Image: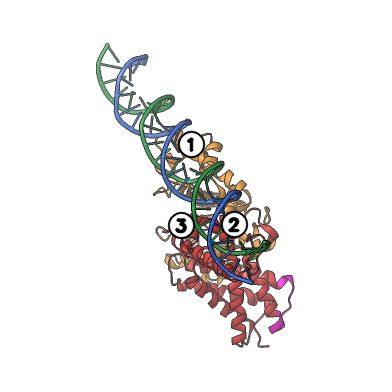
Chain colours: A red, B orange, C blue, D green
Amino acid sequence: MSGSSTLLRNEPVQARSNARLTSLLDAAAAAIDEVGYERLTTAMVAERAGASIGTVYRYFPDRIAVLQSVASRAVDRFTDRINDSFAAEQYETWWETIDSLIDQGVDAFANEPAFAAIRFGDVLDLRPREGHVTGNSRVASHVASILVSRYGLAGGAGLSYHLEVAFTMIDALLARAFMFDARGDAAFIDAARTVARTYLESVLGEPQAR
Amino acid sequence: MSGSSTLLRNEPVQARSNARLTSLLDAAAAAIDEVGYERLTTAMVAERAGASIGTVYRYFPDRIAVLQSVASRAVDRFTDRINDSFAAEQYETWWETIDSLIDQGVDAFANEPAFAAIRFGDVLDLRPREGHVTGNSRVASHVASILVSRYGLAGGAGLSYHLEVAFTMIDALLARAFMFDARGDAAFIDAARTVARTYLESVLGEPQAR
DNA sequence: TTCATCATGATCGAGTTTCGCGGAGTGTCC
DNA sequence: GGACACTCCGCGAAACTCGATCATGATGAA
């Protein structure tokens, strides 16, 4: 888990504490899927996790932090899955990499609890927004470093920016695809794919096998 | 005002009632700009509007409905502004039309109270989502009918769909542009423009003067 | 035309319920 | 024993209700 800044009140020390934390986050995610994150209450989280309310507040400073933590965990899981998929597959071009990323995104929208609702947390209106960092940008810079090391693309702020533009579009389009259809509207998913490819080719050039 | 389904509890009948409604919505929008829509309370809305809490609940069934109504009014205002701009200007091609739309969007993000926070309401996670209609799709079908009548484009579901794809991307990119910068990050605004043009040209063909 | 009447829309705000939040105290593990 | 994990219970604030009250404009008799 990365974003441990002020989201969590106490760092878990003992082993069972980690289990508690994940069970709280799982409970929160399940509840969000049912009632929406607007109507999520701390009591729901406690009840579903088989804990008392005080326990929730032991881990999270407030209700918003629960939401942020669910989002932050989604980012971590996503980057982990990216790493796993790179360990398993040998993608020839950067496009195949991005394409598989979209597959992962579709899978997350379809199967990961609460992902369709809060995604990487960029839909939450937090003020002040700390550090000018979005969930999308966290994923973008992670992917940027991979593309640089594997396909010899020119890195730097430009690449991260282009990837954030692409991910912002993909994210919005996939969210729309899953808005009314739990399996995902194929037309919007395809649109995300073609739009992302067209945009990235225009700024990165044709995909080349390395 | 269009979306009067179940957002409002009672249709305003007397003249002063309409004034009340707009003053409540104005108050809500101003409060949202200050504290964010998550922290908006019904008491804030009442106080700012110079009304009592009971009056708020006379017009809105609950706190969420206030948010939805602000979003719904934003859609109405946007389509009204589109109509006004068509009455005033003679755009040669459909692209000039879309381009001016993006200008209107930028202006709304920059100047319309609460717009940057809730936009057309698609960021709100409401369940159940009624009627499979998004704020973006409402705008899209409105613009579709205009494009058909003025530039002889083939209409139907296809055009509305393509426009919704485009508006979804534009909306997401503009939201990102205004996330940390009240005046709008120029790079993301430009990205919205080029991406929208590229996508729409690929599905509608080159812009032609009519 | 005038004006008292009155049904109903509009408003108020005290009261109720629910929820966010947290501290005091108890159990559990090393 | 000391640090940590957890429960119990209550305070304060926010969401929401409801009956009393005020305002409006249509009606009709003089």
As shown in the figure, which amino acid type bears the numbered disc 2?
A: Ser
Q: Position of residue B54 (x, y in %)?
A: 45, 37
Q: Are marks 2 and 3 in contact (CB under 8 Å)?
A: no
Dot 2 or dot 1: first in sequence order is: 1
Residue at which label 1 appears? B20
Whole-number angstrom distance, CA of label 2 to CA of label 1 = 33 Å
Q: Earlier in the sequence, mark 3 or mark 1?
A: 1
**Local secondary structure at mark 2:** helix
- Eyeballing the image, is D6 above or below B4? below
Query: Is residue B197 at least partly visible in the picture?
Result: no
Quarter containing the C terminus of chain A: bottom right
Letter of the chain that mark 3 sits on in the rendering = B
Callout 1: residue from which chain? B
Spatial separation of the CA atoms under disc 2 and disc 3: 31 Å
Residue with the mark numbered 2: B100
The structure residue drawn at horizontal position 61% and vertical position 69%, both measured from the top left corner, is A14
